[in-house]
Image (tube, rainbow, N blue to C red):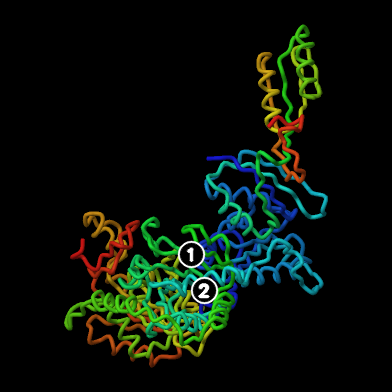
Amino acid sequence: MAEGYAMATGRVGVAMVTSGPGATNLITPLQNAKMDSTPLVAITGQVGTSAIGSDAFQEAYTTGLAMHCTKHSYLVTDADEIPNVVHEAFHLASTGRPGPVLIDIPKDILNASTTLSEPTLAGLPGYKPTTHGHPKQIKAAISMIENAERPVLYVGGGVINAGASAELIEFAEAVNAPVVTTLMARGAFPDHHRLALGMSGMHGTYTATTAIQKADVLVSLGARFDDRVTGSVVDFAPHAKVIHVDVDPAEIGKVRNAEVPIVGDAKNVLQALIDRLLATREAADAPWRKEWFEQLTSWQKSHPLAYSQEPGGPIKTQYFIERLHAVTGGDAVVASGVGQHQMWVSQFWGFETPRSWVNSGGLGTMGFAIPAAIGAKAARPDDLVFALDGDGCFQMTFQELITATTENIPVKVAVFNNAGYGMVKQWQNLFYGGRISATYLDPSVPDYPKLAEAMGCVGLRATNPDEVDVVIEKSLAVNDRPVVIEVVTDSDEMCFPMVPAGGSNDTIVMGPQDL
Amino acid sequence: MSQHTLSVIVEDKPGVLARVSAMFSNRGFNIHSLAVGPTHVDGRSHITLVVDAPELEQVKKQLHKLINVIKVQELDTAQALQSEVMIVRVSCQPADRGQVTDTAALFSARMIDLSAVSMTFEISGPPSQLASFVEHMKPYGVMDLVKSGRVAMKRLSDISPAVVVTSNR
């Protein structure tokens, strides 16, 4: 919930839990926030200071457990430290590369009295993020981009974290370069824009993935060359010189060597690039790159995203997503779980604005959608918030809808019931000889609408394509409680395009016929 | 994998050493030697790390990401000022004491314990000097040996370490 709140707003999300099991249950969200650079402050209770280390009731070594899944952590041992620690925690969570910060507070410290002192950041002598790119590197980057024949802007979640979408659009237009957005960056650049190529990588569009493979200059902005983007690293973007912009210096050169490394916040660096560009030429002089754009357009025509919805046949998840977008005009925050449905939302939902997409990218945490959507709705009560979830994911976290009902947070949930873990089943079918194992869920259990009603939500179901618009309209008419729509979908549908894990991005599988 | 020497200035706070050492284990790198102690500045500790790692650029960046780490410096192992303390117990009958003591004197090793069957020396200096001393003591029989972690500091003088008498590398 805290992550959904943070991703939908850019503000620091806060989670508070008890000691022991409360803290251990928080480990997954912390790692999720770390992987996706989500600003989070987690406050955990701890047993009293005199009991620490004695295996006391509900004791866990929380700061130790969280060491690898936080940006930083604190164990407060004196109530006088609390103002500074809280101040530092919010500063650390929200600046530089955002991330989760944990504050562990023993019970006696929570009960103690203290005098509020004016908090300072003097206790962080080693923390000075570099936010402005080096002018020499900015100059080198501009020269490289201006001379490129086949440039691609490879945009990651850092652009959303930096609030740099406006600068990105201005820059992309000024240099006339196509834009690829990673899963975490969906919405950073409007999908309807003439320069937008969509998502690249394992389930990206053919054009986005192939554009990077053929690029001569790759400008990475707040992206981290994740394996789901690169496929086989040695085969990734083999012709490209790389300009790598990231606020975290440790990302630069981690996976791929950068010809022009730029440490800095994406917003500042993009602004510096624009300023440098405008200082050296008129914006109208943007290189035309006719051949490159003709090539991209031809790929878009020959290899579009595709699926086939039979009029009487089972509902395709892609069809529901397209209909929901059409009915709502795309004016919604969408949250997803992890798996096929997540990829289809990324592919088929036209994202136009940053922070309209809430999902678990790096860690791939199933069950993310419902709590994240509740957090997003709590943060943006006037916006339509839709969780687009799989049946596997739904079964992991649906109980949070009780909280949504109780707290009057009217989120909407569509559960794509394809009778199992569709993505894992897809791999079992494609790469493991059809040996289906542990990926089947009985589609009739639970009865989703009944379960929804039991939790105080409105429960709906669509089993035929012609019911899709009807249930969407019905769900939009409810504003006083959560709604759950069970969408009974085709259990054999597979997600394409696909680059098999570890394969080269030159070997894109467009459908089962390619295997 | 090659050995690298890192000089790391950190805040003197609980848990900092755990964070630093965990960062190495997280990446599967072995820490060959580790020494921690306060510096002349209040609230600052100096960690000297000798690590087996293929390359250090990523390690240095990851160390720097730790909030309590203030400065990270890689030292040129051949040039840096380096010292270790070693205590070594050598099997030694009274008849051999003269020879052993003579050898120890050549290395400026100090005898700190004497028993009927052994002599125990304390010696400090660059790692190569300590290794050489151990080689010379082996014929008598090394009974026990303990070493501190290596401490190191950047050399500022232009003097080539080869001409510094106490350092034979």
Front residue of A163/A424: it is A163
Q: Position of residue A253 (x, y in %)?
A: 51, 58
Q: Looking at the picture, how far across and down is residue A362, in whole percent?
A: 46, 64
Residue ID at (48%, 79%): A374
Eyeballing the image, is A461 above or below B34?
below
Residue at x 33%, y 74% (from the top left corner): A344
Q: Nearer the viewer, residue A81 or A140?
A: A140
Residue picked out by circle 1: A224
Q: Is residue B31 above or below residue A310?
A: above
Residue placed at 48% from the left, 75% from the top? Answer: A372
Q: Quadrant of residue B81?
A: top right
Q: Quadrant of residue A470?
A: bottom left
Residue under label 2, please give it: A142
Q: CA distance from mark 1 to mark 2?
A: 21 Å
Identify the amino acid type marked 1. Answer: Arg
N-terminal of the pair, mark 1 or mark 2, is 2
Tell whether A260 sits left or right of B20: left
Q: Residue A50, how many percent across, how many down?
A: 73, 54
Count of numbered labels shown in the rendering? 2
Q: Amino acid at mark 2?
A: Ile
User: Is A63 situated left or right of A191 in this image?
Assistant: right
Comparing A271 with A93, the one in front is: A271
Dot label at residue B101? none
Mark 2 closeness class: few <14, some 14–19, many ≥20 residues within 10 Å: some
Query: From the viewer's perspective, is residue A173 above or below residue A99?
Result: below
| Chain containing the residue with disc 2 | A
Front-most of residues B165 and A251 = B165
Is the residue A453 above or below the residue B83 in the image? below
